[in-house]
Image: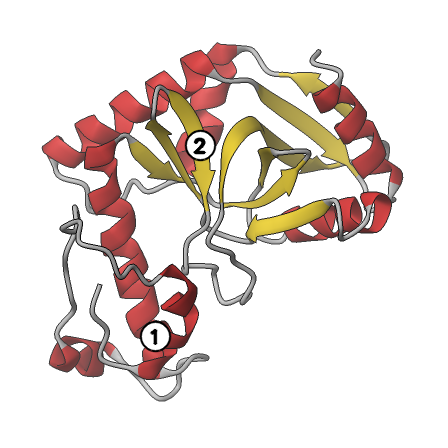
Amino acid sequence: MKSNFKEFESKAKDYQYFGDEPPLIKFTIREDYVRQKYDDKMLMSIGGLENIFMSDIFNKKILKFNAIFLHSSAILYKGKAYLFSADSGVGKSTHTKLWIKKFGAENVQIINDDKPIIRFIDNDWYVYGSPFDGGSGVNTNTRAMLGGIVFLERAQTNSIVKLNKKDVFPMLYKNTIKLSLDDEYADYMLTTADKLISENNFYLLKCNTDIESAGICEKFLTDGR
């Protein structure tokens, strides 16, 4: 990915590759297109707007490689990646911060706070960091085996259940790429989503902002129920 503005370069410096393998994906966005779309009344820089465009293209193109992004906050805990997905404002970032508070920053690492990548490769499912973090600035170039995906809902009391497979797709679809997909890429997305659902565990956590929500969630996930 080649950018026109410095903002993306600073975000992506930890993802630079200096080997000899050719890229599977290669693209750039014309500078004049970004400038045409930019309005100085926007609550972001022109480089920030370019990042949004690049994220949209990247997250579309990875669909051809058994990969899909999920709007979520992803953590690394005891060698596995757990993703917490919710609508904006529900508190996925707040919840992952509770994990850090509860179990310690030495034990919990945030992989990406907005757009981690899930990919089937090497005969298993893995989670990857990406430089696209929704402006939070929290992302790392990390790969870890997928441990589980948790959808969040606000509630007065904390509880967690394992979801039935048939209930997962609407939640997953709501929080991944779906706009501007032609038939080919829509098919890639649906195929990957179906495989992801059939081969992994998904949970619904109803929670408040008490630190014990992290404790209840961690116990349920690691007990393997």
113 lies left or right of 61: right
- Label 2 amino acid? Tyr
- Label 1 amino acid? Glu
Residue under the point 42% across and 70% down: 11
| Residue that label 2 marks | 126
Mark 1–mark 2 Cα distance, whole angstroms, equals 25 Å
Q: Is residue 36 above or below residue 205?
A: below
Q: Quadrant of residue 102?
A: top right
Q: Quadrant of the C terminus?
A: top right
Task: Residue 23 in the image: state x and y as whole percent.
Answer: 16, 51
Task: Residue 172 in the image: state x and y as whole percent.
Answer: 45, 30
Q: Quadrant of residue 56?
A: bottom left
Q: Is residue 183 above or below residue 180?
A: above
Task: Residue 221 in the image: state x and y as whole percent.
Answer: 70, 23
Residue under the point 79% across and 37% down: 214
| Residue that label 1 marks | 9
Q: Is residue 90 visible?
A: no
Specify the color scheme.
secondary structure
